Amino acid sequence: MRIALAGQPNCGKSTIFNNIAGYKAITSNFPGTTVKYMETRTHVFGFTCDCVDLPGTYSLTAGDPAELEARRHLLSGDVDVILNVVDASLLIRSLELTLQFLELEVPMVLCLNMMDEAQRKGIQIDVKKLSDLLGIPVVPTIAITGKGLQELFVEVLKVYEAKRKGKTLKFSKDIEAIISDLGSVLHSEWPVNEKVPSRFLAIKLLEKDEFFIKEVRGVIHLFKEIEKFQEQLEQIHGVPSDEVISSERHALAMNLFERASTVIHPPKKDFRIVIDHWVMHKFFGYLILAGVFYGFFNFIFGIGGYIEEPLMTLFNEWIGDLEELFGKESLALFLSKGVLQGIAGGIAIVLPYLVPFLIGLSILEDIGYLPRVAFLMDIFMHRIGLHGKSIIPFILGYGCSVPAVMATRILEFPQHRFIVSILTTMIPCAARITIIFALVAFLISPNAALAIFALNILVVAIFGKILSLLFPYPEASLGLILEIPAYQLPPVRNTLKKSWYRIREFIVIAWPILIIGSVLLALLEYGGGEKYINWFLSPLTHALGLPFPVGTTLIFGLLRKELSLIMLTQALGTTQVLTVMTKTQIIVFTVFITFYIPCLATIAALWKEIGKKGALLTILFTLSVAILLALATRVFFGIVR
Amino acid sequence: MTLDQVYENRKAKVIDIKGGIGIRQRLGQMGIHPGDEITMLRYGALRGPILIEVHGSQVALGRGIASRIMVEETE
Ligand SMILES: Nc1nc2c(ncn2[C@@H]2O[C@H](COP(=O)(O)OP(=O)(O)O)[C@@H](O)[C@H]2O)c(=O)[nH]1
């Protein structure tokens, strides 16, 4: 049995999915975070069921890639039951999408989630009535507590066994007449795909859906015919045909809402409105924003620094012991040192900063602070020539560049996606943040680290402006349209599991690479091979005034950014970096690392999102920016000193 | 009048949306169609976006878009 979870962003889909899948999907309180879809296999009452969490979509018109993807999957014939999750407190808007799902004529169950929120808003829903009106089972749930989920899957199973489809809710008579005329024309004139119901197709063509229009454009006489139907509809109603259909659907949804629910009391004025008054305030909002990020920074540094110091001392002692044990020039020493340094790098340098960072980011995401940041920052993003929604990939970029690059799909125009993809790779990801913390904040001063973050934002802003002038996107580009979901208390279990999921990715994927890389470097050193790499990179290291052995670390950084840091201590032959590098050198090195070529995983993501040329351009671009900035930093400190 | 001219905490009803199919669709998805009632919650700093409430959900709209939504005040 194949179930597809579908619904609008933030309806609680991922929470339900996690409940059955054991936290594989990433939930968050940000519209549109599920960009790629997740799949899991579970067993429900003895049935094997493959469950897909589709990207949250507001509608089934092919507006952006995420929506197209969701629709493609639903129409592929690979779905036995659509599990439509809706936010019961936003029923009217949600029902519009439900109506569109019904048009697909696939067996379906409606999950009325967030019943607690609906109750708070004073909305009482007659579940039985709604079920009768739609012709599908309707199950009320509260996903965060797991309430109703059992019943939900019982209904899914029943629908699956009975292959029970919902009702086709009819539009006004005249519109239905046109739909059915067009439907029969399509039926005879066009090799209609069995999986795509002809009523659905007719509606989409009347809605001027880009995807389907493109499909028929080749068949000229058919296309002319369709245009005639569109005009007919426009003449009767006096508005464009797409608007006729969407108004009809809206009216249907309103009608359903009125018949199946009653507002028993006005929404309870809750403290969240008061919070928003300050958080989104014209002036205090920005103070709070600065405070939150400053606090966040200190939180990570406080915890990380506190843990890093004693651990490093411990590992240094052990490395000293190794030298005594194996003798100075032996292969055994090089190997064991490589392994130990790889392990030490993970435990003592990366994890102390990564763990608090990821937990902090999860909390900010889950309570729903990020859309507020987008609201506050929109105007500034426009000043640098970018769309307000670009802030989303940028913020995600502080976690990891890969999801950030994928999140650019929420932007409408390819040119725009292109620019933001390139820029977001320059935002320091968790790995690079660790480097900034462990080298600059820890060895020099927290304020110097803050300065690097500030420099980074400034540089991204400047290049945002330059790139948006070089690759202009259509003036018609729409401004911000973004839902601001209600705050949610971060469900502790959920937040922790989500952070754990991300941390685990470091432990099982990155850490082994770190250890292998570390051993590789030790072997290179033993055989003298690293000299050649360093020699090859010496023009660069020389120009930047960095120690000769640093060259190799930059190459390793291409695999995983954390490697640069761990390799650094190894290449220099000491963990007391300050004894062999000046403060200026450390800053120049960190600046270079922050901006230069993204890691392999990110390059792969770029390749997929903006193509080979885009990926190559990003490599060249970031490399030049990094070299220029590192040089500038060197010159600056040369003058200041 | 246009939506961006409505005062904070006032309600207005959408009469028409000026613009092509793209803008109509995106607003429609958020539950904004001709005939719907919108509450203006707040203005962003400078000429930043506005925050409105429609059918129980909060939506941020850029000023450019807001100025294409024709409304009449209802209270
Ligand atoms: N109050 C309440 N919050 C919920 C419920 N279900 C999910 N949430 C919260 O709503 C937010 C969005 O949920 P998520 O699963 O990420 O939604 P998705 O975007 O549809 O995947 C999260 O902060 C959840 O903790 C519910 O039934 N009641």
Image (cartoon, rainbow, N blue to C red):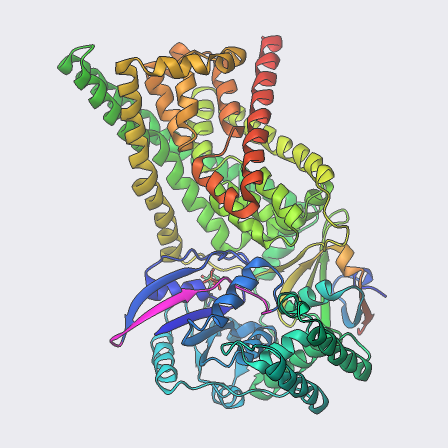
Q: Nearer the viewer, residue A275 or A389?
A: A389
Asked whether the viewer can see residue A348, the reply is yes
- The residue at 24%/76% (across/down) is A46
Where is residue A189? Give x, y as percent: 63, 80
- The residue at 37%/67% (across/down) is A51
Asked whether the viewer can see residue A400, the reply is no
Where is residue A88? Give x, y as percent: 52, 75
Which quadrant holds the C terminus of chain A?
A: top right
- Picture mark count: 0
Q: Nearer the viewer, residue A48 or A220?
A: A220
Question: In which image quadrant can residue A1 be found?
Answer: bottom left
- The residue at 64%/68% (across/down) is B29
Location of residue A535 with respect to A605 vertically, above or below:
above
Is A47 magenta? The answer is: yes
Residue range (magenta): A45-60
Where is residue A425? Give x, y as percent: 54, 37
Location of residue A135 with respect to A623 vertically, above or below:
below
